[in-house]
């Protein structure tokens, strides 16, 4: 297994005002990824995996020295009567790894869908880390530390030392390849 420094929850396109994913815009992100000492990031813009998929495609072709995992951050309103209901999905080929982002309270219905949980989030410093650590241990979820960067300079403020193989091992098969982000 190859252990890498990966920040798995980032919003670099929102940080730049949502430009089209191009060689230039991905180059700006890649430069920052390298400056922050990361091996890679997951691009997890809100509600659309478009940026993640395009950025991953461009990075694979032009910047193979960094890892870009496509993903999305979804609101799961309606699942749980709480204030912060977010799930991040990471797309690993035909598989999806799902984690709860910045939990503030117990959400068993959300965790039932997840293979991981954030125990630290740089943007949501007031999240409930203790609860998240306990849930990770109890439910055997992968504990994650991410930046949730909405500014390029925040990429890598938190990161994981983790292997992509582990994420793939723990992931699920994607159910609907036409609408991969509508998993549940
Ligand atoms: Zn986020």
Image (tube, grey):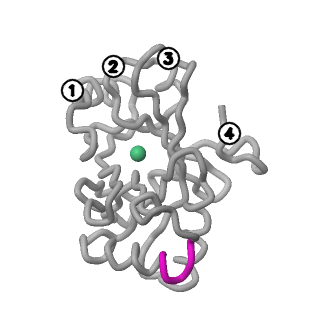
Residue 31, given in percent of the width and then of the height, sits at 34, 79
Position of 85 with respect to 118 (left or right) is right
The residue under label 4 is 182
Q: Assess disc 3: are there few (<14), some (14-19) or many (≥20) residues with their C-alpha within 10 Å of its C-alpha.
A: some
Circle on res. 22 = none
The answer to whether mark 3 and mark 4 are in CB contact below 8 A is no
Location of residue 99 in the rendering, given as x and y in whole percent from the top left corner: 45, 39
Residue that appears at 40% across and 27% down: 84
The reply to whether discs 4 and 1 touch (Cβ–Cβ < 8 Å) is no
Asked if the residue at label 1 sits under 8 Å from ligand 1, the reply is no
Whole-percent x, y for residue 83 in the image: 40, 22
For the residue carrying disc 4, how many other residues have a C-alpha within 10 Å: few (<14), some (14-19), or many (20+)?
few
- Give residue 80's mark: 3
> Neighbour class for label 1 at 10 Å: few (<14), some, many (≥20)?
few
N-terminal of the pair, mark 1 or mark 3, is 3
**Measuring 60% from the left and 50% from the top, which residue is drawn there?**
48
The residue indicated by pointer 1 is: 130
**Residue position for label 2:** 105
Question: Callout 3: helix, strand or loop?
Answer: loop
Pick whichever of labels 4 and 1 is earlier in the sequence.
Answer: 1
The foreground one among 97 and 14 is 14
Mark 3 and mark 2 lie on one chain; the one further toward the N terminus is: 3
Task: Give how far apart the Cα atoms at labels 4 and 1 are.
Answer: 30 Å
Q: Does 134 appear above or below 159? A: above
Say whether residue 5 is magenta.
Answer: no
**Whole-number angstrom distance, CA of label 1 to CA of label 3:** 20 Å
Return the disc, 3 or 4, that comes first in the chain's sequence: 3
Marks 4/2: CA–CA distance: 24 Å
Q: Give ligand 1's quarter of the image.
A: top left
Image position, residue 166 (x, y; %): 44, 52
The residue range painted magenta reads 21-25
């Amino acid at each position: 297994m190859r252990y890498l420094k990966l920040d798995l929850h980032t919003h670099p396109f929102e940080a730049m005002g949502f430009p089209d994913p191009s060689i230039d815009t991905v180059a700006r992100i890649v430069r920052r990824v390298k400056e922050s000492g990361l091996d890679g990031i997951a691009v997890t813009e809100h509600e659309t995996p478009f940026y993640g998929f395009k950025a991953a495609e461009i990075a694979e072709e032009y910047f193979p020295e960094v890892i870009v995992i496509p993903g999305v951050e979804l609101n799961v309103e309606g699942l749980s009567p709480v204030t912060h209901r977010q799930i991040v999905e990471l797309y690993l080929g035909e598989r999806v790894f799902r984690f709860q982002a910045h939990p503030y309270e117990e959400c068993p219905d959300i965790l039932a869908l997840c293979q991981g949980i954030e125990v630290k989030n740089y943007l949501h410093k007031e999240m409930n880390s203790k609860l998240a650590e306990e849930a990770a241990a109890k439910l055997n979820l992968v504990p994650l530390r991410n930046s949730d960067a909405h500014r390029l300079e925040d990429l890598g403020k938190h990161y994981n030392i983790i292997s992509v193989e582990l994420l793939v091992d723990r992931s699920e098969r994607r159910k609907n390849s036409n609408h991969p982000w509508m998993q549940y």
